[in-house]
Image (spheres, grey):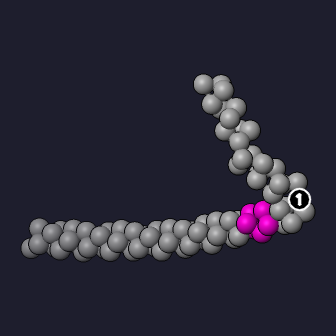
Amino acid sequence: MFEDLLEVVAGPWSLVALAVVALPAGRKALRTVAREAVRAGIAVSESAKDLYAELKEEASDVVAEVKAERKHSVSKTAHKAHE
């Protein structure tokens, strides 16, 4: 098992990874990829925050509507009880 892991670690992909990290052009490319990944993550995060805010507002509106309906219903019931 250790030998299999060693083959993977010391295989051709490790040479590619070493070249990417060791060479200036490779580091620049890696930095560009990292920046794009962070940019995409920020965009997703902002979209999720906007969606959450919209859903929270909708839920708040629904709660307010139900409370108003209940208040109206209770006042109608109380008014009928006094008649």
Which quarter of the figure is the N terminus placed in?
A: top right
Left or right? Give the position of 66 relative to 14. Answer: left
Q: Residue visible at 71% across and 38% down?
A: 9
Decide: is 16 above or below 58. Answer: above
Assign the C terminus to one quadrant of the image: bottom left
Residue 9 is left or right of residue 72, and the answer is right
Q: Is residue 12 magenta?
A: no
Q: Nearer the viewer, residue 73 or 12?
A: 12
What percent of the width, then of the height, locates residue 4? 63, 30
Residue at 78% across / 48% down in the picture?
Answer: 15
Q: Which residue is mark 1?
A: 23
x and y, in percent, of residue 22 in the image = 88, 54
Q: Residue furthest right?
A: 24
Residue at 65% x, 32% y is 5
Q: Position of residue 41 (x, y in %)?
A: 64, 65
Q: Point out residue 70 in the picture as x, y percentages from the top left corner.
A: 25, 68
Q: Is residue 36 left or right of residue 75?
A: right
In the rendered image, the residue lying farthest to the left is: 83
Prevailing secondary structure of the magenta residues: helix
Tell me, yes or no, if residue 16 can be seen here.
yes
Which quadrant of the figure has residue 72? bottom left
Specify the amino acid type for callout 1.
Leu
Does dot 1 land on a helix, a strand or a loop?
A: loop
Segment colored magenta = 29-35
The tally of labels here is 1
Mark 1 nearby-residue class (10 Å; few <14, some 14–19, many ≥20):
few
